[in-house]
Image: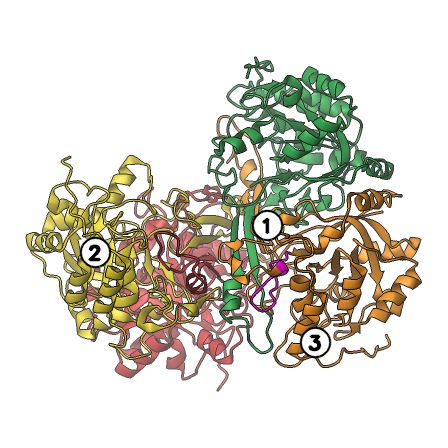
Chain colours: A yellow, B red, C orange, D green
């Protein structure tokens, strides 16, 4: 596979990042009480139109399996792979354990996972800009009891609309982009053009880098969760803001290229701007293999997208299993 | 509110239940390796047709909030309300805890819940018929490591189709049906007729009893999770089987009327037949208030239904936030 | 049972509480890096002497059972009864699930509990005095990653010494003290005198109110965890400080009387002084029934006390099963 | 360091193992209802005598830190390092989050861990012999609700007595024994003789291999939890049974040498005999560094031993922090 030369963003200082955040900031745009951010772009008519994209009745699950083989390898402190525990089993049942009078033989289970363990939505309370979060709410409104503003439960009926896949890796002719490759605006536009799909206001845009599929094929996650990755360059912020899209998603842990070309004060500079300033939610660790293959096969890169979060009160994210329906 | 006289099913013995299971058993119908059950009824064309039901672009979330105020009060042993815990907070961020070099201020959290804590799909591994589960697999295939057959992950891209609400409570003219009221086939047919909606092959049918709304209004769950409830009478099994529906859902903890009129050997007789014999999945603890109000207002009781489970490997169920889209 | 008239402390303002904290503050007494507080009073000779109290070889467990029947009923937000979950079972084993080659048939489990769920040590990081904790460390050193100072792990080999039971309820001639009864210094001294035991420097003093036994007998915890309780009056702070004891324990959820006679700004005023100012650790929810009966029978109220915390790194407490050995 | 030639036990078949279990089986020895096994050997006088070993007032904690740096690296399926989560923090407190009226500023936390995560007691329900456990109880008495016989709670006041350290590594003149080195009866006797300590009825015997200290020093656990290890050879079973000791402990994950020289049907043959047949409990993953250094320094290898389990109802083990007191 040919090694692509990543086009890095210019060396960014904290001031550059804060300046960009100020420039693209949507605070107040939908009033002082807003907790939806750019999801406000989605109109009922957009949803009706999106449903018309269901033409062959094929459904793709974009959620990664939740189990002990997930990518959380302790690199980013404090996250773990899902713990799935049985509360009642078939072996118990057959051993007669449920045959009280009256009886019902059953199995039951529980799951314990960080909301960011695998495929997930970030909430608008997930990243802060200095001492504030989306729409200017104080960051301290997120305490040990959860996010008292901008919680994920606000999105309970909002994650529905038109989805567009931008398969940058396929467009570049590689199975996966190299770690550290920063996807430019030119890359995004060229991919869309080649695919014959237009990115529109209110879209959920899904970027495919191929990184997850590479790691799944190798059977080794390595630094997938928290380490280097291909992803959107800093300059993509203007594109995201200008296009007025409603959500941005990818098959990597953080959408953004890693490392991004920043000085010592800033980690993930793109995050500083997207969630808290623009008010756009991230969909991360999306599983895209079958969807991408189908889009390549039929040349249709748009679809109905339905990705409801769990209604976690005061959550800063939610595990999800997004559905792309063509 | 007038007290309805519940029409109870005849006193059932274990033999009656086993006989009914044998009569309606779909094992082998889709081959010896099937793990989907009656979800097999859904065709791609059904999904395309269902998407055409999106006409006004309104989305309803049918997932109950996941938090400490949920219905799990320890009545049915071993379940608990969701535990939501913060791994990183805004108060930490503002106290400078994330300002390592380089830094990103963020919040993070985790959730620990039984898959049956609130709004949920049962998997086909959730209930057993004697020593077997759906399609004849041994119940012992569900052990402490999970469901090695009929796991919820098999439904990852299957919970999409036409949804139909049968608002039995509204049809009966009551805010909610009484605990112990057994909904008959006549009730189901009359409700559909009055609503002007047809129940068809491959539908996800959602039964509204009003019980959840009553408990939410009272601010007291009482025995909601595991106790008495209004719900489908035993005779509804023939209706479910005959209609060839794909899923059956309700706003109660177990869809089935409680108590059901059974002798001492059998608890929840309807469960013995639905999941393991017919192979139909249950959607339980659905939150229906706004959807029901909208249907009553516009007279349209059918919609696009999209309710993806989390992809829990070997799970016997999944928390969900189903979406009804009109 | 005669109703005792509780002798309440005078109405306390926040200033009163802060003034008392200032008066009894031990900060710096054992140097600027100390994280042990009054546990420093215990000398090796104290431990040798305490071991000599083992005269009949009888051991008492003071830990309450950890299970679903515990006192956490959601009154004090965010705590739950222990969740005990099986990772491998005998039913699995007998069903042949462990008979891989080579095999071992076994059972395994896990437990998930708040450190304050039942019998527990508080760490010196558990309660703050304004913006500081024990020895003057900033409270912000306790963040979402844990207690970076004054963690429970510092006590890993410190909870050993002489134990003394003050059975106030028995001394008063009642099975249990009423909720709201404030135990005075006079009560403590009279109890010790009647029991013929002296409270000395470096002792672990255990106060019995009988409240837990009453609730266990009734089979209903009620507001045990977080509600009203008998317990030490505010004036006991001087006694604790003056006696130079090493630990203070009780059979209630918080040792302190509830309600304590304070104005609106202060909750649990005694807590404001004990842990952060005096630097004395609390042992709470101790199960005392058999120990108390034995002491009453043989008239010996002193014993060897060994109550090791789990070595929870950066913990603010630990579940324990203290041992009183006579 | 010189490489020791491990003296392996002869190649064992399943029949050999079952025959040894039959030979050493203590079932019924203390009646048909016994759940204590060889802990029955401990008399009150033994405890009194053990307390007399406290001569210099020095306490050693034998519990490993419970945190994310523990040895559970997923090798033995389904175990994880402790998850420590904060329920309330000092950063919240300082941000004014607890200043409700009336207020108390505090921190709170929870811990979620397998009972076998780190330093731990196995219960007598932890390992089965064919279809039975200790004293002949059916293994199926351990189901998804826990161990209905032989639960760890039965040991709540039993883990107190004389402790003896056998520092085999030091006796052999090496910092640690090689993985796969099987400690023989001759090794045990020679170590005791050299140390000048006698192993007696009712002792808790602690074997030091040095493996844990080696891994801690290297900062890499490798296969510590579940992989190869030095440890007791199969022949030690006769010694354990004959000596009538009350508990057997070590600084490795399973006490027993790994690999043990068995054929394909048997994994950990020593375990098949100790827990279910002899009825002796295992103490595993003990942290021994300071204790071993002190014993080497003063030549005293006996001490008062107090290692209370948490009172986990129906538990198959418990995390512990054993105390050796000299």
Question: In the rendered view, does D299 fall on the left or right side of C112?
Answer: right
Residue B24, how many percent across, how many down? 39, 55
Q: Residue at x 66, y 35 (%)?
A: D133
> Which residue reaches farthest bottom?
B1
Marks 3/1: CA–CA distance: 38 Å
D196 shown above or below C151: above
Residue D282, how many percent across, how many down? 66, 34
Circle 1 chain: D
Residue C49, how many percent across, how many down? 85, 44
Q: Quadrant of residue C78?
A: bottom right
Q: Which residues are magenta?
A: C123-135
Number of the front mark, 1 or 2: 2
> Which residue is tagged 3?
C259
Number of the front mark, 3 or 1: 3
Q: Residue at x 75, y 74 (%)?
A: C179
Same chain for the residues under marks 1 and 2 in the image? no
> Which residue is tagged 1?
D145
Helix, strand or loop for disc 3: loop
> Which residue is tagged 2?
A234
B312 shown above or below D38: below
Q: Is residue C128 magenta?
A: yes
Few, some or many C-alpha atoms within 10 Å of disc 2 (few <14, some 14-19, many ≥20)?
Answer: many
Pick the front one: A263 or D157: A263
Circle 2 chain: A
Magenta-colored segment: predominant secondary structure: loop
Marks 1/2: CA–CA distance: 52 Å
Same chain for the residues under marks 3 and 1 in the image? no
Marks 2/3: CA–CA distance: 57 Å
């Amino acid at each position: 596979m040919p090694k692509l030369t990543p086009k890095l963003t210019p060396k960014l200082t904290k001031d550059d990042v804060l300046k960009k955040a100020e420039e693209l900031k949507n605070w107040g745009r939908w009033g002082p009480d807003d907790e939806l951010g750019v999801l406000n772009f989605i109109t009922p008519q957009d949803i009706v139109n999106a449903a018309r994209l269901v033409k062959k009745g094929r459904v793709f699950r974009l959620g990664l399996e939740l189990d002990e083989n997930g990518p959380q390898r302790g690199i980013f402190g404090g996250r773990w792979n899902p713990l799935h525990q049985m509360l009642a089993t078939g072996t118990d049942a057959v051993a007669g354990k449920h045959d009280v009078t009256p009886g019902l033989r059953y199995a039951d289970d529980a799951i314990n996972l960080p909301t960011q363990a695998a495929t997930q939505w970030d909430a608008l309370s997930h990243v802060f800009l200095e001492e504030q979060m989306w729409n200017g709410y104080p960051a301290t409104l997120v305490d040990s009891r959860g996010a008292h503003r901008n919680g994920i439960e606000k999105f309970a009926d909002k994650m529905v609309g038109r989805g567009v896949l931008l398969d940058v890796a396929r467009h570049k002719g590689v199975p996966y982009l190299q770690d550290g490759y920063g996807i430019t605006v030119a890359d995004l536009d060229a991919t869309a053009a080649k695919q014959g799909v237009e990115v529109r206001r209110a879209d959920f845009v899904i970027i495919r880098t191929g990184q997850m599929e590479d790691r799944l094929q190798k059977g080794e996650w390595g630094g997938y969760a928290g380490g280097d990755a291909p992803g959107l360059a800093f300059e993509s912020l203007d594109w995201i803001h200008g296009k007025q899209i409603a959500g941005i998603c990818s098959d990597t842990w953080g959408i953004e290229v890693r490392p991004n070309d920043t000085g010592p004060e800033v980690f993930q500079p793109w995050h500083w701007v997207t969630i808290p300033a623009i008010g756009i939610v991230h969909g991360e660790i999306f599983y895209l293999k079958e969807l991408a293959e189908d889009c390549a096969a039929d040349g249709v890169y748009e679809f109905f997208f339905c990705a409801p979060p769990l209604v976690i009160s005061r959550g800063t994210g939610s595990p999800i299993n997004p559905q792309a329906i063509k």
